[in-house]
Image (cartoon, rainbow, N blue to C red):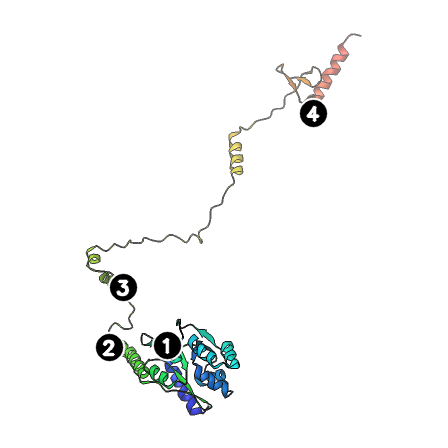
Amino acid sequence: MRQKRAKSYKKQMLVYTHTFKFREPYQVLFDNLITEQSHSSSFELLRMLKRTIQATEIKPMITQCCMEALYTTKNEPLIQFAKNEFERRKCNHRTPVPPGECIHSVVAIQGLNKHRYVVATQDVELRKKLRKVPGVPLIYMNRSVMVMEPLSDASREYSQKWESGKLSGGLNDSEAGKIKKRDDVEKNNNDEEGEGANDEPAPKKKKLGPKGPNPLSVKKKKKTNSNELAKQDEKEKKPTRRRKHRKANAISGEGEVNNDDGKREVSDDGEREVSDEGEREVNNESKDVIDSTPN
């Protein structure tokens, strides 16, 4: 591809990208004529198409009516090539129609190229019809060279209007570029709803008071277990007992000791509960009793 032609193709694709929002992978519609011609001349159709529109990825597609036209040729290698390389595009035609009409009905929807198709065709009449639709890149083969048509008059007018609309909207509009507040947006919405919405009083905004401290930054209180609290209560309720050491006067049987008041204290184990001094006194008294007994 010549460098001059490559630059012009690049400029055209930039217009389609910015104005008509074309994105990769580009959807390319092939008709039966360009498929037959490329196959008969052993032309690398897909590789040369990528080089022409300067794209890394494309999505080659063919309509069902174009496939029916290829079936009529009874060329099996050509039919297998179209089946393997092209994605089938449903045209919703129950009975086959001419390929030119089928592609025109798929591309031109309400006078616009809504699905952003790139059309590769050898049909001259079809190219004339699609030039009237803005935003349709047209590609055809001239001998062994793939050529992209320049921007059509409809595409150029649409692009100029779009660019001038962007510029005039930003320069002449006094509100352009301003960030609207939320209150202004709500007022505009209420005005659009109708007069009934304006009669109703606007709800008052609640005044927010001082904010409290961040709960994550506040020191947490120490938690005490219920068992510890119960033990503390029991300690507080119990009176303090004062232990007194009493001297035993006499021993009456095992495990029994006579106190000064004449009361008996019996230990659980059957042993005497007396202090060391009390034991010594009891032992002395028992010796005196034994000496005083008559022989």
Do residues under tags 2 and 1 come within 8 Å of each other at their CB atoms? no
For disc 4, the marked residue is 276
Considering the image in quadrants, where does the C terminus appear? top right
- Which residue lies at the image location 28% right of the left edge and 76% below the top edge? 170
Mark 2–mark 1 distance (CA, rounded to whole Å): 36 Å
Image spot of residue 30 (x, y percent) = 43, 80
For disc 2, the marked residue is 172
Question: Position of 292 compared to 268: left or right?
Answer: right
Image spot of residue 247 (x, y percent) = 65, 20
What's under tag 2, amino acid-wise? Asn
N-term mark: 3 or 4: 3
What's under tag 4, amino acid-wise? Asp
Helix, strand or loop at label 2? It is helix
What's under tag 1, amino acid-wise? Val
Quadrant of the rendered structure where residue 214 is? bottom left
Question: Position of 292 compared to 129: left or right?
Answer: right
For the residues carrying marks 3 and 1, which lies nearer the camera in this image? 1
Image spot of residue 161 (x, y percent) = 28, 80
Question: Position of 60 compared to 258: left or right?
Answer: left
